[in-house]
Image (cartoon, rainbow, N blue to C red):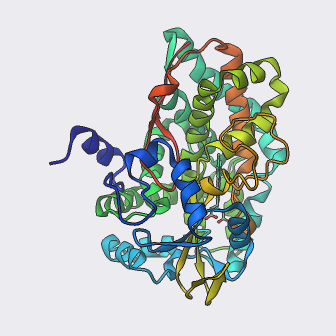
Amino acid sequence: MLGLAQRAVEAKWPMVALRPVAGRYHPYDPAFIADPYRHLDRLRATAPAYYSKVTGSYLVSSHAVATDVLGDRRYTSNRMLDSSLRNRMFMRLGKFSPTEKQALDNTLANVSADTHQRMRNAISQDFGKRRITALLPRIEYWVDRLLDEAAARGRIELIDDFAAKLPILVVAELLGFPPRDRRRLQEWSDSYLVLVDPMIRGAGIKRMSGAFHEFDPYIADTLRRKQADPDDDLISRLLERHRAGEFDDAQLRTLIMMLMIAGHEVITNLLGNAVASLLRFPEQRRRLCAEPELMPTAIEEFIRFESPIQAVWRIAAEDLDIEGVHVPAWRAVTVLIGAANNDPGQFPEPRRLDLGRADNRHLGFALGAHYCAGPWLARIEAAAALSRFLERFPNFRGDATRLRWKPAAGLRGLYELPLAL
Ligand code: HEM
């Protein structure tokens, strides 16, 4: 019989198994979820690439090896090429329709190198520092609207009331979706989180599939409207490139879908993790309030300290060797970003939050060809959100001893963070 808590978890995060699993990597063990870093330290000390049966992949946890793997072109990020049982199960459980299969083939992770480059070029200006800085007044508008509602109540459930709402509104506006569609965009995007989880659960894949059959026609509909009546937004600009033959229909729809998904949960987690870290380190909170100009280094430290993305995958495109560990061709390597970002060989006293940390070469946005496309949006949005939050509610109170982390191996974020303002 499933317990109530587990049923609630599975309803919201259906890809998750709470039971501990075989081997040294137990990402769903409650002890791991509460504090992954002790476990990741042990894993780092075990082997440069530790084969985990449960993920069917080689786990990499040191900063040096993670950096090498992410920068090495002999790995591909196309997970369709993963020959492991995990991937075969994913495909079998998915029973994907041809359009769904086409969408999976067209994600930025899975397209060929030249299509990837074209897609990245198509979005690079809109996600560059200059354009995102120009978006700041709109970001601040949404931040203030959400915080006004909280101020009227005198309390906030930081995740649901703020951290989850803000990024959807911002990325929807940047793309050109109306704010009234926030709820369904969020629901559809959430169901795609199964793609960043190393575990396989049929229910999660089914939910993703269900979402695809609503999300894809919704995007097609939006494209038809923007074609007839273009606007000053990213979707309209991507349509121009599509007309110029830079990418086909399926690539265009998938790119839009991926941007919506990628621009959401990670920022929710960044904001929640950042405020939780401030509760855990009151002296760093006082420091940031006294020196607000520290915000840019603080954001990098929040990303390092409690990385919203904890793991990414690469597939060896030939027989490879990781410091003496043989990785056969077409097997997956899981780069444990959260472990690399807490490697004492790279970061002195990694479990100390230091908002002025110098030389913070964290891998929170990954590296190499698939380096995050949205770091400026993440940085500028998070800085606006946290600065306004601290200015308006400098005396916020919460309980850092009762943090409830979502059980997800690929992502790290809180279910809730109730605060008195
Ligand atoms: C705190 C916020 C964020 C974090 C920590 C983060 C982290 C990452 C990481 C680690 C990757 C690499 C995935 C891989 O190598 O497999 C990635 C890729 C990506 N991110 Fe972000 N991201 C954030 C925000 C955003 C935002 C706001 C957007 C834009 C809407 C975005 C768009 C993307 C895209 C499109 C990719 C795929 C890039 C490619 O494959 O070429 N991210 N992100």
Residue at 82% x, 30% y is 294
Residue at 80%, 36% (x, y): give it.
Answer: 296
Vertical placement of residue 352 versus 373, above or below? above
**Residue 147 in picture, x, y percent from top left:** 59, 20
Between 303 and 379, the one nearer to me in the picture? 303
**Nearer to us in this view, 243 or 383:** 383
Q: Note whether 143 is above or below 359 in the view shown.
A: above
Residue drawn at (84%, 48%), measured in percent from left and top? 359
On-image quarter of the C terminus:
top right
- Give the image location of residue 83, x and y in percent: 46, 84
Residue placed at 85% from the left, 42% from the top?
Answer: 358
The front one of 124 and 225 is 124
Which image quadrant for residue 276? Answer: top right
Is 85 placed left or right of 162 in the picture?
left
Residue 161 x/y as whole percent:
50, 26
Residue 74 appears in view: yes
- Count of numbered marks: 0
Establish if 332 lies above or below 215: below
Q: Is residue 223 visible?
A: no
> Does residue 127 appear left or right of residue 307 in this picture?
right
Relative to 170, does residue 371 appear above or below in the rendering? below
Corner quadrant of residue 20: bottom left
Q: Quadrant of ligand 1?
A: bottom right
